[in-house]
Image (tube, rainbow, N blue to C red):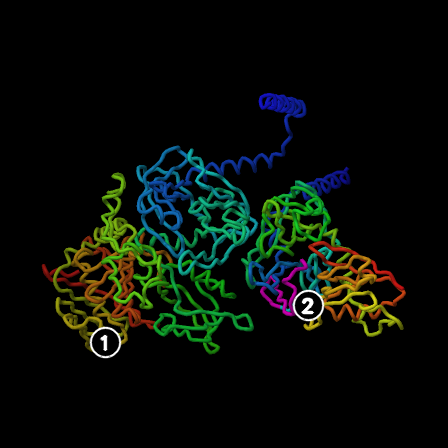
């Protein structure tokens, strides 16, 4: 009898825990220590030099969006308590438009990506970001509330929105996608991580801005790959095996822009007539982002990476052209 | 085609209703706490909407929102709402009536204005909350007149949460600075300006007035800001003074060093902070009762106090912690401020420059249009004319006079100073040092003190006489005290009501009259509870520490309240405590 009574009480308590929503102010206070402010390149002509991000490990790994803000050697990361660190890029996935930064510290509060949840239209949400750079130092991120209005693939809007990410997004009724909000966290009303606030997107046809977040589940594999070093250029490893006859740009028929900077962006300058590259449709001004799933950040890295591919093997390139990502397979000889 | 389409829609709608009716034939089983929560929200919105004011400028010059804060019609709004409206405006509330309203005071730096609705003494009004208790994530809602939609006098309600607190938003030039403000995602649109932001109970936490937009156009994009009601509470007495209010500077600027400490990066030697020992390179620890960890944090504190307040400051100087009070000076000189807010009211009209190429010539478009002095009363609606007095430097002098009289008359009723004519002789003890006798005549003040004799000659330059030594001019200060008692505020010299502020010895805000006689500026502080004089400051010169006298231990003597204890302070040191045993005054030879 007593046993049943206790079980009943326990069930009742469980039911109450599920229906009773936590106070937003308590939820907010719990999330803030996991949020960071990111400062980098920009600050001219309407390009803001700041964005948001959040900690995904206690050792200082930060998930954020891949953008021009990170296109500098001096990325500053400010923690919720005001401490400042230099952020290093661990890796990025331009296809998903995400990047992972690392700061040299530990013992931090963080989100666990494995505990992220999926949410449905109608779910009440909170967003955390440093939109408009309102907060500085130890001031907390801004919190906005709203609901998920729809879940839809972004490519349904192809042409209207210029984006390389084509996967599903949560469309929000809260006006979250303001300058600097990208990289912020989308959580449930109880503070469970659900999404990453996307980059600013403006409909090129009617001028409206889209408020959306990318579901964390779309990102977890890529994050794991980046953290495991699987997107890291192999040429960075000293003991990488080097074939006797590797591919070269010349043998593929590609000529890059002159390599004049420390990190010259790997843009194609011209393509030789009759070459494999021409056959597969590579064009001048294509930006090469990946060679065989390894991230390329400069002309030098491209050369080094090709030196590790035997000329008899295929080379898979991911190319950025007109806000589209194109995969091209160049055949080995 | 249109008709048939309408018919079709109607049929579909009816069908839907029918389906719905079937579906909810059973009463909905809504949890009791949801119903209670809904009822609470409805009640809060109802209460809050009643005190919300819709401001319509005369002659269709825009408008905005406001909120009533007293039954006799005082209402808060934004400076940028009332500025184009001028001195008189029409205001509606949701009782469906339109009221005449008059401008009382403006705070152009804080973007606040106080107006008064006329015609009732039982207006619904909002309760002022403690906005320092507001937390990020709290529900809140804005009520107001966005896009001036409320032509039916029913305000618009927009619900949201608090997105941030203690936010700092930079001023435009030196005006419209939003310090220590509340950020919300409740929709704040043009026309919401000046209107209230309420907490979920419908109590007032802020005045909406600004948003972040950048490339998004001037409609809400989820980031609105409200001036915290606690900032406005600091200004409340000042806002009733009818003046054009200024905000404060410390006389020093700060920056963050590489360790994240907030450090003095520049300091003016004429500032009170400098006299209190603050120097270049010192580290700020606390200001206005808050720990200071960022430059924004410092600006937040500075932005919530009126010019002239004394605010606690703690800093590290050469490793030593110093806790003191500093007097805050103005962001602008009075003339600068006037030029910014009333550029076309310059009196006399600015003379035309001899050489138009001189660098001090205002650029085209900013040149103040020289206009003859305007007779503003003449243009006002008849209903508001009795509530307006034009005077240079004031938004509406009528309200200054009103408060001067309120403060002085309350004081006079209890102290009957008009009977204290002739010479005065104060007898008592200076602390435990010994006997003290001070004789005040029309031409001199003579003191026989334990430390020796001292005197002040009243036809000499009063600003040069700081006797007795170390007091900062106690004898001249006592003379000023006697003089204002005998002459009252109409004969003393230039007198105005400053507002109300705390002193280092009074946490409760005291009403302040500023009175200038000859070149000497005095500030008289009166208790709002008793109406009695609690302290005075006498400034021999505005760049030096005043002589401060704190009056206490009032006793009724012959039906007149008299202080028994006068504590004298100059700068950081206590000069002494004058314990009064006897005050003799000489018209009828009576001693008390």
Task: Choose between B9 and B315: the one closer to the eye.
Answer: B9
Q: Residue at x 23, y 52 (%)?
A: B373
- Is label 1 or label 2 in front? 2
Which percent across, then down, holds residue B342?
31, 55
SS type, badge 2: strand
Chain of the residue under the numbered disc 2 shown in the image:
A
Query: Horizontal placement of B196 versus B246: left or right?
Result: right
Say which mark, if any, is on residue B3.
none
Q: Quadrant of residue B125?
A: top left
Query: Quick one: SS at disc 1?
Result: loop
In this view of the protein, which residue sits in the foreground, A258 or B36? A258
**Location of the N terminus of chain A (image quadrant):** top right
Identify the residue under disc 1.
B450
Q: Which residues are magenta?
A: A65-84
Is residue B156 in view? yes
Is any atom of residue B410 visible in this view? no
x, y percentage for residue A182? 63, 55
Q: Chain of mark 1?
A: B
Q: Nearer the viewer, residue B448 or A174?
A: A174
Query: Do discs 1 and 2 share a chain?
Result: no
Please say if A226 is above or below B111.
below
Task: Provide residue A309's location: percent of width, then percent of height.
Answer: 85, 67
Q: Is A80 inside the magenta-drawn segment?
A: yes
Q: CA distance from mark 1 to mark 2?
A: 74 Å
Q: Residues within 10 Å of mark 2 (few under 14, many from 20)?
A: many
Residue bearing mark 2: A88
How many labels were placed on the picture?
2
Residue closest to the eye, B573 or B53: B53
Q: Quadrant of residue B424?
A: bottom left
B188 with respect to B34 (left or right): left
């Amino acid at each position: 009898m007593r046993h049943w009574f206790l079980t009943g009480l326990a069930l009742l308590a469980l039911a109450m825990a599920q229906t009773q929503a936590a106070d937003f102010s308590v939820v907010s206070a719990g999330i803030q220590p996991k949020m960071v402010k990111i400062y980098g390149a920009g600050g001219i002509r309407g390009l803001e030099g700041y964005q948001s991000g959040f900690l995904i490990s206690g050792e200082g790994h930060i998930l954020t969006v891949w953008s021009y803000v990170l296109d500098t050697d001096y990325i500053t990361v400010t923690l919720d308590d005001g401490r400042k660190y230099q952020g290093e890029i661990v890796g990025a996935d331009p296809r998903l438009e995400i990047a992972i930064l690392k700061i040299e510290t530990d013992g931090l509060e963080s989100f666990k990506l494995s505990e992220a949840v999926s949410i449905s239209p109608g779910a009440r949400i909170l967003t955390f970001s440093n939109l408009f750079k309102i907060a500085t130092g130890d001031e907390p991120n801004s919190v906005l509330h709203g609901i998920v209005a729809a879940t839809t693939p972004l490519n349904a809007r192809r042409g209207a929105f210029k984006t390389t990410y084509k996967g599903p997004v949560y469309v929000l009724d809260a006006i979250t996608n303001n300058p600097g909000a990208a990289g912020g966290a989308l959580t449930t009303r109880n503070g469970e991580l659900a999404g990453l606030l996307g980059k600013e997107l403006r409909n090129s046809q009617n001028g409206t801005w889209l408020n959306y977040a990318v579901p964390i589940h779309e990102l977890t594999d890529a994050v794991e790959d980046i953290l495991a070093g699987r997107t890291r250029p192999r040429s960075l490893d000293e003991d990488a095996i080097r074939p006797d006859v590797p591919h070269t740009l010349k043998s593929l028929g590609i000529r890059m822009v002159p390599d004049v900077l420390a990190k010259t962006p790997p843009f194609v300058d011209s393509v030789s007539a009759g070459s494999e590259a021409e056959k597969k449709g590579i064009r001048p001004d294509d930006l090469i982002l990946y060679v065989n799933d390894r991230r390329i950040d400069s002309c030098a890295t491209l050369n080094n990476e090709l030196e590790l591919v035997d000329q008899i093997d295929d080379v898979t390139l991911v190319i950025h052209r007109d806000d589209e990502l194109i995969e091209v397979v160049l055949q080995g000889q | 085609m249109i008709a048939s389409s309408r018919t079709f829609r109607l049929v579909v709608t009816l069908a839907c209703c029918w389906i719905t009716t079937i579906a909810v034939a059973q009463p909905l089983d809504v949890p009791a706490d949801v119903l209670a929560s809904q009822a609470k929200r409805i009640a809060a919105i109802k209460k809050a909407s009643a005190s919300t004011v819709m401001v319509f400028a005369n002659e269709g010059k825009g408008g905005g929102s406001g909120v009533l804060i007293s039954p006799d019609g005082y209402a808060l709004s934004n400076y940028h709402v009332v500025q184009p409206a001028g001195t008189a405006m029409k205001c509606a509330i949701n009782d469906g009536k339109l009221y005449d309203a008059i401008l009382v005071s403006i705070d152009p730096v804080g973007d606040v204005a106080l107006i008064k609705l006329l015609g009732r003494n039982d207006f619904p009004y909002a309760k002022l909350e403690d906005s320092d208790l507001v937390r990020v994530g709290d529900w809140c809602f804005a009520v107001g007149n966005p896009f001036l939609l409320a032509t039916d006098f029913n305000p618009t309600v927009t619900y949201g949460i608090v997105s941030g607190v203690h936010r700092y938003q930079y001023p435009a030039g030196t005006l419209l600075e939003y310090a220590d403000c509340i950020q919300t995602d409740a929709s704040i649109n043009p026309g919401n300006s000046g209107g209230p932001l309420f907490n979920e109970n419908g109590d007032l936490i802020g005045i909406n007035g600004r948003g972040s937009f950048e490339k998004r156009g001037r409609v809400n994009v989820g980031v609105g800001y409200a001036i915290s009601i606690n900032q406005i509470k600091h200004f409340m007495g000042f806002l009733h003074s009818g003046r054009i209010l200024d905000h404060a500077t410390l006389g020093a600027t700060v920056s963050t060093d590489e360790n994240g400490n907030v450090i003095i990066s520049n300091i003016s030697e004429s500032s009170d902070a400098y006299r209190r020992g603050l120097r270049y390179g010192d580290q700020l620890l606390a200001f206005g009762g808050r720990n200071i960890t960022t430059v924004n944090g410092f600006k937040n504190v500075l932005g919530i106090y009126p010019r002239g307040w004394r605010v606690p400051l703690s800093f590290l100087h050469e490793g030593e912690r110093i806790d003191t009070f500093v007097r805050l000076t103005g962001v602008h000189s009075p003339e600068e401020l006037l030029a910014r807010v009333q550029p076309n009211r310059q009196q006399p009209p600015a003379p035309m420059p001899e050489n138009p190429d001189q660098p001090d010539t205002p650029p085209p478009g900013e040149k103040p249009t020289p206009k003859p002095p305007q007779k503003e009363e003449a243009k006002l609606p008849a209903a508001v004319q009795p509530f307006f007095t034009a005077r240079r430097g004031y938004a509406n002098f009528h309200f200054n006079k009103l408060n001067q009289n309120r403060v002085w008359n309350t004081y006079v009723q209890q102290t009957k100073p008009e009977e204290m004519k002739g010479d005065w002789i104060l007898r008592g003890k200076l602390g435990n040092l010994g006997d003290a006798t001070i004789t005040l005549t029309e031409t001199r003040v003579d003191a026989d003190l334990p430390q020796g004799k001292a005197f002040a000659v009243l036809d000499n330059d009063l600003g040069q006489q700081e006797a007795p030594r170390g007091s900062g001019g106690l004898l001249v200060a006592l003379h000023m005290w006697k003089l204002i008692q005998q002459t009252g505020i109409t004969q003393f010299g230039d007198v105005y009501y400053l507002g109300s502020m705390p002193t280092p010895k009074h946490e409760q805000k005291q009403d302040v009259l500023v009175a200038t006689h000859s070149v000497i500026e005095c500030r008289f502080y009166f208790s709002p509870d008793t109406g009695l004089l609690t302290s005075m400051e006498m400034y021999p010169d505005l760049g030096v520490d005043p002589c401060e006298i704190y009056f206490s231990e009032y006793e009724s003597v012959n039906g007149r309240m008299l202080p028994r204890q006068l504590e004298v302070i100059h700068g950081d040191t206590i000069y002494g405590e004058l314990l009064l045993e006897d005050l003799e005054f000489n018209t009828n030879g009576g001693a008390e």
